[in-house]
């Protein structure tokens, strides 16, 4: 069974190690960081499925980190760990996109139960359901486009780019957002690469003339159908 990759950001080394070792006996792969900046870098490069963030961390606190990550990824589950129990902190955590909140000290069993609950909820929304787009049927999980009995295979990046265009149907998908999300950086060379992928998607969708990917100059792309 594949291990479930999670990111744990905890600035107390002994506590972080205890949590890491406990989770690793329960089929989790734990990416342990000791500050918010390191956590953000690992999040961008390693693509964990769930985040466990200590609120009070050096360089970037858990709330600031969650706020930054939520701009790019509205779906990843986030659990905050904190020594604080004030109501305003709990409210702030949820307002910044936290899914759960655990006060120190806590039991490992409680943490694992909460993690599994969020992961199971995510699985139910795992994007495996085919999506109708004009005359096409798009399946993100299989990375396919089907039309009139013909199946077109997509690359991983093509499929994810199309998925975000569909999620933002009739709205502008910002270049910087999708570049950071799928390419990791919004520099010039990645932007040119994305333009090539958009051209490829247009060619694959041309069997249905009602579908268009419009270039909104200076902002991004808009899928209309």
Image (cartoon, rainbow, N blue to C red):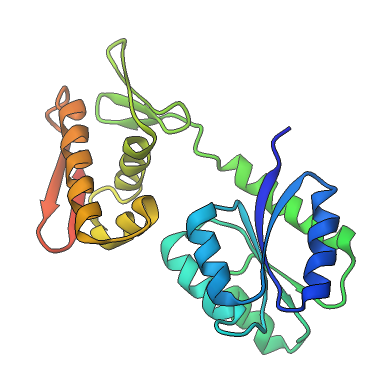
Horizontal and vertical percent position of residue 161: 32, 43
Q: How many marks?
A: 0
Horizontal and vertical percent position of residue 16: 77, 69
Horizontal and vertical percent position of residue 160: 37, 41
Residue at horizontal 76 percent and vertical 87 percent from the top: 84
Residue at horizontal 38 percent and vertical 56 percent from the top: 184
Horizontal and vertical percent position of residue 191: 21, 54
- Observer-nearest of 123 and 46: 46
Is residue 102 found left or right of 64 in the rendered image? right
Q: Is residue 203 above or below residue 84?
A: above
- Residue 42 visible to an observer of this rendering: yes
- Residue 97 visible to an observer of this rendering: no
Q: Is residue 26 above or below residue 96?
A: above
Q: Is residue 42 above or below residue 136?
A: below
- Observer-nearest of 122 and 1: 1
Is residue 146 found left or right of 107 in the rendered image? left
Q: Residue 83's image quarter? A: bottom right
Q: Residue 175's image quarter? A: bottom left
- Quarter of the image that includes the N terminus: top right
Residue at horizontal 40 percent and vertical 28 percent from the top: 143
- Quarter of the image that includes the C terminus: top left
Is residue 130 found left or right of 14 in the rendered image? left
Residue at horizontal 46 percent and vertical 72 percent from the top: 68
Q: Residue 79's image quarter? A: bottom right
């Amino acid at each position: 069974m594949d291990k479930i990759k999670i990111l744990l950001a905890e600035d107390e080394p002994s506590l972080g190690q205890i949590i890491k070792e406990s989770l690793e006996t329960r089929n989790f792969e734990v990416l342990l960081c000791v500050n918010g900046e390191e956590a953000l870098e690992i999040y961008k490069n390693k693509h964990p499925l769930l985040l466990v963030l200590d609120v009070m961390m050096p360089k970037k606190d858990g709330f600031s980190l969650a706020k930054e990550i939520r701009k790019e990824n509205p779906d990843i589950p986030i659990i905050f760990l904190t020594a604080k129990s004030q109501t305003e902190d709990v409210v702030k955590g949820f307002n910044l996109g936290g899914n759960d909140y655990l006060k120190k000290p806590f039991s490992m069993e409680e943490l694992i139960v909460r993690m599994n609950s969020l992961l199971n909820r995510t699985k139910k929304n795992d994007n495996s359901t085919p999506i109708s787009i004009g005359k096409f049927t798009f399946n993100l999980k299989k990375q396919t486009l089907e039309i009139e009995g013909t199946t077109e295979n997509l690359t991983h990046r093509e499929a994810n780019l199309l998925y975000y265009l569909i999620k933002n149907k009739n709205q502008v998908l910002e270049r910087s957002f999708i570049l950071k999300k799928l390419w990791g950086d919004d520099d010039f060379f990645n932007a040119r690469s994305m333009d090539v992928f958009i051209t490829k998607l247009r060619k694959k969708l041309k069997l249905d003339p009602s579908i268009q990917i419009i270039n909104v100059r200076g902002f991004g792309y808009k899928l209309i159908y």
